[in-house]
Image (cartoon, rainbow, N blue to C red):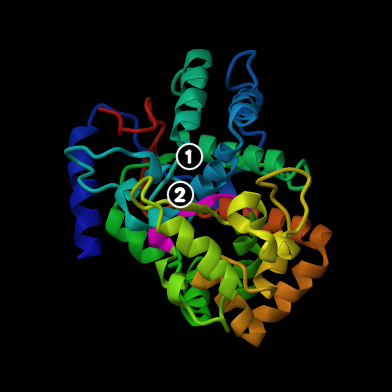
Amino acid sequence: MKTSFVVVCMLAVAFRLAAAVVVPAAAPYALKVGYYNSKCGNSSVESIVNETVTAYLDADNSKGAALLRLFFHDCFVRGCDASILLDKSDVITSPEKAAGANIGIAGLDVIDAIKAKLEAACPGVVSCADIVVFAGRDATRYMSKGNVYFDVPAGRKDGLVSSSAEADSTLPDSKADVAELVAGFTAKGFTPEELVILSGAHSIGKAHCSSFKDRLTAPSSEINASYRDDVLNKICASAAKANPTAANNIRDIDAATLGSQLQGYVVPAVGGDYLDNSYYKNNKNNVVLFHSDWALVAQSSTLKHVNEYAANGTLWNSDFTSALVKLSQLAMPAGSLGQVRMSCRAIND
């Protein structure tokens, strides 16, 4: 069924894009650091991205976690092709952003602002796929206080296919056990250790109660009982709004909600929503949101890496950097076509 959907979409897209520039997507070996040097007049593409990201995060640093999530959720499904940005249309009937796995997806306004500036500086040059990766990299540097940073090989094209069903079947399930998680990451070329490394991104951000509702009744052998009953259940029982959110990191839950019993579990940070190795310390204390997080301490093959990174934040910074570079090089499926979109939200007419 999924293959038929992709074929139909590509045929429809090919018909509608007869006058548009559509080329084979760049393979990982075709990507290059400094790809946009001298391609945007006197403007620096990466400087425009970084300045825009910094301005948005200075105003609201929650957008940092959103941009990192956007980076992962885009690249993990069909390679780094900006398919997560596409809106519903006659051709894209159920885009990735409508997937259950993408509930609460955010940071799109930052990408739109960057794209507008780049189109003004050098129209039709910078792909949305590269913008997503650049922005994710810069948000990571901001949220880690500069401890995680890497040069981004660029030259990606924007994809023509986006499917909510494909996103739901590909992105890691928050209720998954280790075997399922390892299988999903292996399919993308990642090792079990890299699964543990990338999971450390859960030291920032927030999640909807629907994404961790199974944890509200999980046994105390899997989750700290006070954290479950006195914090998560109270947050999710709030009548203030439907499907409330909770901070991924116990550190970022306000003191009044957290209560005195759990203060000892809080790992101090440079600032709220700080990207660091506190995720691994929280996991060892059974104060993490998702079953898929706790599952990493339930198996010796992954627990050893949780212990390793809980004890060495500098090592995690380095290994997380390497894992993100690898993530950024995931390519579109073989034979895919790509373009540089005029708007990140729609395929060119």
Labels 2, 1: front one: 2
Q: Position of residue 226 (x, y in %)?
A: 59, 70
Residue 258: mark in rendering: none
Q: Residue at x 44, y 45 (%)?
A: 81
Side of 179 relative to 250 (left or right): left
- Range of magenta residues: 204-211
Residue closest to the eye, 103 or 170:
103
Q: Position of residue 93 (x, y in %)?
A: 20, 45
Q: Residue at x 66, y 24 (%)?
A: 47
Q: Hey, what amino acid is under mark 2?
A: Asp
The image quarter containing residue 311 is bottom right
Side of 315 relative to 47 (left or right): right
Are the residues flagged by discs 2 and 1 in contact, CB closer than 8 Å? yes
**Residue 207 magenta:** yes
**Residue 312 magenta:** no
Which of the marked residues, 2 or 1, is nearer the chain's N terminus?
Answer: 2
Q: Residue at x 54, y 61 (%)?
A: 231
Task: Quarter of the image for the C terminus: give it.
Answer: top left
Q: Secondary structure at mark 1?
A: helix
Q: Hey, what amino acid is under mark 1?
A: Ala
Q: Secondary structure at mark 2?
A: helix
Regarding residue 269, the answer to whether it shows in the image is yes
The image quarter containing residue 249 is bottom right
Q: Position of residue 89 (x, y in %)?
A: 21, 37
Give the residue number, with chain letter if any, for mark 1. 129
Task: Quarter of the image for the N terminus: give it.
Answer: bottom left
- Badge 2: few (under 14), some or many (20 or more) residues near its Cα, within 10 Å? many
Side of 93 relative to 56 (left or right): left
Regarding residue 253, the answer to whether it shows in the image is no
Give the residue number, with chain letter if any, for mark 2. 74
